[in-house]
Amino acid sequence: MKLEKLHLVKDALIYNLKIVFGSKFIYFLIAAVAFYLMIIGIMLFDDDAVQEFEIYNTILFPGILVIFYPVIFSIQNDKDARMLEIIFGVPNYRYKVYLLRFAISLLLLFVILLLMSWFAVFALVKVHVFYLSYQLMYPLLFIAGVAFFFSTWVKNANATAVIMVIIGLFFFILAEPLEYSKWNIFLNPLNTPSNLSHTVWQNVINQNRLMLIIVSVIAILGSMVNLQRREKFV
């Protein structure tokens, strides 16, 4: 009996992996890797010494590209494949399906962040690989959670993509004025300001990370509420 359950779990994971990372995901992954290698190449031939906080900024955008497609287009892919009627037809099944896919997307994202961090160590400068990847997960989880919410609210992947680009540009414009503020979703914890004490800076980081986690959880819970409205999806 347990063996059968393990086979079912394995089959479910394999199927959802194919859904999450099928179709056009490979193009987003290629774009992320190409952009990352291009920036690393520029840094490699630059005369200035590369700092650890610069690697954080270098990996952030490729991370956004990696998480962008599986989160936003998950429901749209099921709709195009005419799978929504099956998924929404089983009570509470849709929550398990989309939460599983969300978790798979985040897990793969973390693995890719680790690989990019390790490559930076090999090519440029020694960085704390796990700590760097861990810190990058905060803004990327925020972006993933908000994108997931809008995908279940708007119910159209292309429209959601446009909304997320607008939101991203808004926060990107504010990134410099809010560079060391707790309200900056792109806050770089490795870029320690010279005019702040270590204690104050650590408080800013903690408040920023707490804010990102809270908004992410609220966005995911809001997505679950939106998924209750079956008739608006199918």
Image (cartoon, grey):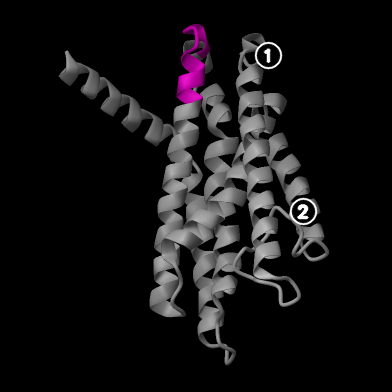
Q: Quadrant of the C terminus?
A: top right
Pointer 1 with pointer 2, Cβ within 8 A: no
Residue for badge 2: 171
Q: Which of the two discs, 1 and 2, labels the residue nearer the N terminus? A: 2
Residue at x-position 57% and y-position 92%: 47
How packed mark 1 is, by other alpha carbons closer than 10 Å (few <14, some 14-19, many 20 or more), is few
Percent x, y of residue 103: 46, 35
Dominant SS of magenta comes to helix
Q: Quadrant of the N terminus?
A: top left
- Magenta segment boundaries in residue numbering: 88-98
Residue for badge 1: 232
Give the side of residue 2 with respect to residue 30, left or right.
Answer: left
Percent x, y of residue 21: 44, 40
Residue type, numbered disc 2? Phe
Percent x, y of residue 24: 50, 43
Where 201 falls versus 7 (above or below)? below
| Front-most of residues 41 and 49 | 49
Give the side of residue 15 with respect to residue 63, left or right.
Answer: left
Mark 1 residue element: helix
Residue 93 included in the magenta stretch of the image: yes
Residue at x-position 46% and y-position 79%: 125
Q: Is residue 82 visible?
A: no
Residue at x-position 40% and y-position 52%: 111
Q: Is residue 154 visible?
A: yes
Percent x, y of residue 56: 57, 66
Where 48 falls versus 136 (above or below)? below
Residue type, numbered disc 1? Lys
| Front-most of residues 9 and 86 | 9
Where 50 falls versus 33 (above or below)? below
Residue 222 included in the magenta stretch of the image: no
Furthest residue in direction bottom, as rendered: 47
